[in-house]
Image (tube, rainbow, N blue to C red):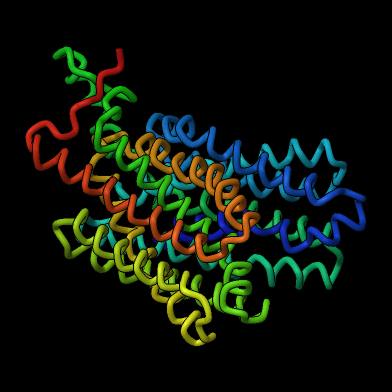
Amino acid sequence: MGLVSTAHAFSHFYMLLLPPIFPLLHADLGLSYAALGLLLSVYAVVTGVMQVPMGMLVDRVGGRTILTVGLALNALALLLVGLFPSYPAMLLFMAMAGAGNAVFHPADYAILSARVGEERMGRAFSMHLFAGYIGWMLAPPAMLGLTMVGGWRFALVALGLAGIAYAGVLVLKRHSLSDEDERQAAKAAAAETRANGGKTGFSLLMTPVIASLFLFYMIVAMAGNGIQSFSVVANVDLHGISLGDANLALTCYFIAAATGTLLGGWVADRVVRLELATAVAFALSAGFVALLGFGGLSLPAVISLMVLGGFFVAVVAPLRDIMVRQAAPKGSIGTAFGIVTTGFSAGFTVAPVALGWIVDMGYPAFIFWATAGITLLGVLTLGGVRFIRASRPAESDQPLPTG
């Protein structure tokens, strides 16, 4: 759990290395902010596109190898940005970093599923998610601190070397990360299934449940993007608080979300009806976020609602991941998570344009109401998961027609 969670922290850490130094890159390299934003877009698009192929590789060769190579590639790419900061090269390096970043969810969940006891799986997933939040929290101060010591190029090289060094630790501790036994058992079961004329591999994952969970992951990303990207401007315009106070409220949201993932892991290990528990948490989050849409709230009220909304939406995360694990056939964990986490990339692609248009139209309240509405759509999606399983208990995960 410690090895995999730390690797996940590096993934989130690397996501936020460049934004804190955008003003320096703008000044030193003469790049527009649109050009700098394109670097992040390339990173996100490649990550999304590569999720499923990386998941299939995980199921074929093992999560341990793919995780180690992916972390090293991600770290190396950012190191190279520091060494060779010409814009065409930077675009290539960010594509490399995106490919490396695509491995973490498929590989991490495959390893945890193979190595952690069933009774602790929810808490293992929650610690994995909590580590990601820690990575986000540490990135800006680490990047800015090292930049003050030796400049932004030195900071990128140093932090890239740190990731490569940790990939070396994963190699040294490889015996703790093996999922070989589970993969071999899955291969034997798949061979028997093929001999009997059944479906195996990717086609086995084309089920109504996996499709519903893909949509759910997409909705989670859209709802999260609404708060992360636009709550600051909406809170300033709607409640008349300062920019600093609006950012403080967002920071409190992230801290509450990190805490919520830990409770979610405890709940996931003790609750049988995961869809119902997830729907309740999502409905609570939507209610608190919707209240932010009523103008003129005091700063304590804004912070309280942001904290409650962030806490309950994050409680969902470990339960959501356990549902994917339950829906995935044995030996297909990597591919399953590759499919559903592609929904994250889809959500982060769609939401900024739509929500940004709402801001441009001058309706800040609708940022919170739209986010709450999107969150409630997630409840309906989970209702679909529950309906499928309840109405077809013996075959709820039968493949969707592919012809």
> x and y percent of residue 18 in the render?
73, 56
Q: Tell me, yes or no, if residue 107 can be seen here.
A: no
Residue nearest the viewer, comparing 370 with 187 = 370
- Write the residue at 81% across / 37% down: 89
Q: How many marks?
A: 0
> x and y percent of residue 155 in the render?
78, 62
- Left/right of residue 185 with respect to residue 287 in the rendered view: left
Q: Is residue 132 above or below residue 339?
A: below
> x and y percent of residue 114 in the render?
30, 47
Q: Is residue 398 above or below residue 356?
A: above
- Left/right of residue 294 with respect to residue 114 in the rendered view: right
* Image-quadrant location for residue 248: bottom right
- Write the residue at 29% across / 34% down: 331
Residue nearest the viewer, comparing 145 with 323 = 323
Q: Is residue 388 above or below residue 292?
A: above
Q: Is residue 129 above or below residue 385?
A: below
- Left/right of residue 187 with respect to residue 198 in the rendered view: right
Q: Tell me, yes or no, if residue 119 can be seen here.
A: yes
- Write the residue at 58% across / 54% down: 358
- Left/right of residue 321 with respect to residue 64 in the rendered view: left
* Image-quadrant location for residue 257: bottom left
> x and y percent of residue 237 in the render?
62, 72
- Write the residue at 62% across / 41% down: 98
Q: Quadrant of the C terminus?
A: top left
Q: Quadrant of the N terminus?
A: bottom left
Residue nearest the viewer, comparing 373 with 295 = 295
Residue nearest the viewer, comparing 337 with 218 = 218
* Image-quadrant location for residue 47: top right
